[in-house]
Amino acid sequence: MRTRVLAVTVDPMVDPAVREAARLIARGDVVAFPTETVYGLGADAGNSEAVEEIYRAKGRPADNPLIVHISGAAELESIAKESTETALRLAEAFWPGPLTLVLPAQRPFRDSVCRGLSTIAVRCPDHLVALALIKRSGCPIAAPSANRSGYPSPTTAHHVLADLQGEIPLILDGGPCDVGIESTVLNLSRARPELLRPGGVSVERISALLGEEVELGGGAEERVRSPGLRYRHYRPHAPLFLIESNVAESLGRAVLDQIRQRVGRGRIGYLGHRRSIGSAPDVVMADPRRDDVEMARYLYSDLRGFDRKNVVAILVDQPDGEGLGSSIRDRLVRGAAGRLVSVGEKVAWDDQKDRWNE
Ligand code: TXA
Ligand code: MG
């Protein structure tokens, strides 16, 4: 299959590329499209065969359910059985935007996107191309991130092409994504709101709006409720190592020496602000990022860029803040599979965890 890339050049509601993408989705094909978080791989959420094609194209484990994208809260009732007052308040406050709500599913979607669960994940993306595509296709669009399963998500059309060339008919190019990491996934199907994945909307803002604490998911039980948590995610080809913020600048070279011993010769990619590391021989630096917003926006692009340069390892300074900082940390920790350089008696990483994850 030849994969076309079509840029959106005019108002998305009348753009010919969007119209073509909508035509393909309506007839049961899959199309990659931009959202404010990452690029998605979309298909008609109610069409089981079309949805299966998403799984095939990206090599996604069959039991990992998909997020359904709608163009406004009014469409919620066709997707979710009960849109609770909490859901409507959150939608009002954060949609369109990077917040996904998990609710009891309407019957027709159970056989396509829910993968055996009785709940469905739904969000309204804050991107004019995505919204126009949903409206023009005339159906809710199921879409996971448009990467090969396990690899960092795509934030440009070019990333999608690198991963899925020959697997899908069309990529809509709407430029680079603004947020850069995926939506926050919040489970509203239980007595108390539960965070299944931190993301573009911080858990602090959600708690503040609801006036109640959000339970933090991620344990063994949540892995059953959100099957995606079980699998490898966000992993570049080169092994990723994280440096905790408590590691002193003066230890930079010692950190690098240890990693060298482990990965051998070759260039090491570095994303961070430590001069002791950035100035070392054979270290390739990404542009240092000003704050968490910028770090999130370019994170996957930076990781993919290191792989393209064939580095033997990637080293990243872990952000330590709340909010977006903790969402970035979540992606990095999963991508690094426990390779965390921290300070104890000496600089060391947690080999125990490392073995457990690999
Ligand atoms: O920002 C995003 O959310 C992007 C864009 C394209 O919208 N999409 C995305 O989809 O990140 P994906 O498939 O890569 O991640 C969806 C996550 C997975 O961890 C999945 O297990 C979880 O949401 N999920 C989907 N349906 C669920 C459900 N019914 N219950 C619990 N978790 C669910
Ligand atoms: Mg994904």
Image: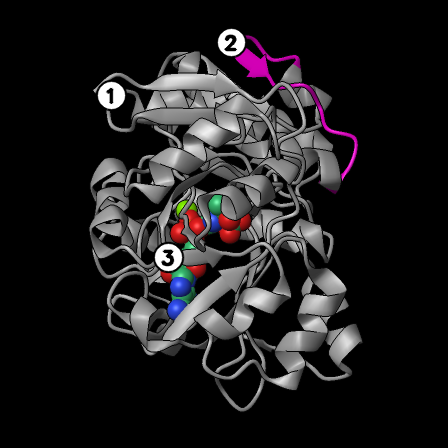
- Residue located beneath label 3 in the image: 66
- The residue beneath circle 1 is 166
Q: Secondary structure at mark 2?
A: loop
Q: Which mark is residue 97?
A: none
Question: Mark 2 or mark 3: which is in front?
Answer: 3
Q: Which residues are magenta?
A: 279-292
User: Which one is nearer the viewer's eye here, 237 or 269?
Assistant: 237
Q: Is residue 332 visible?
A: no
Residue at 38% x, 13% y: name it.
310
For disc 1, the neighbor class at 10 Å (few under 14, some 14 to 19, many from 20) is: some
The residue to which callout 2 is attached is 282
The answer to whether residue 106 is seen in the rendering is yes
Determine whether the beta carbon of the residue marked 3 sits less than 8 angstroms from the nearest atom of ligand 1. Answer: yes
- Residue drawn at (54%, 70%), measured in percent from left and top? 76
Q: Is mark 2 within 8 Å of ligand 2?
A: no
Disc 1 or 3, which lies upstream in sequence?
A: 3
Name the residue type under label 3.
Leu
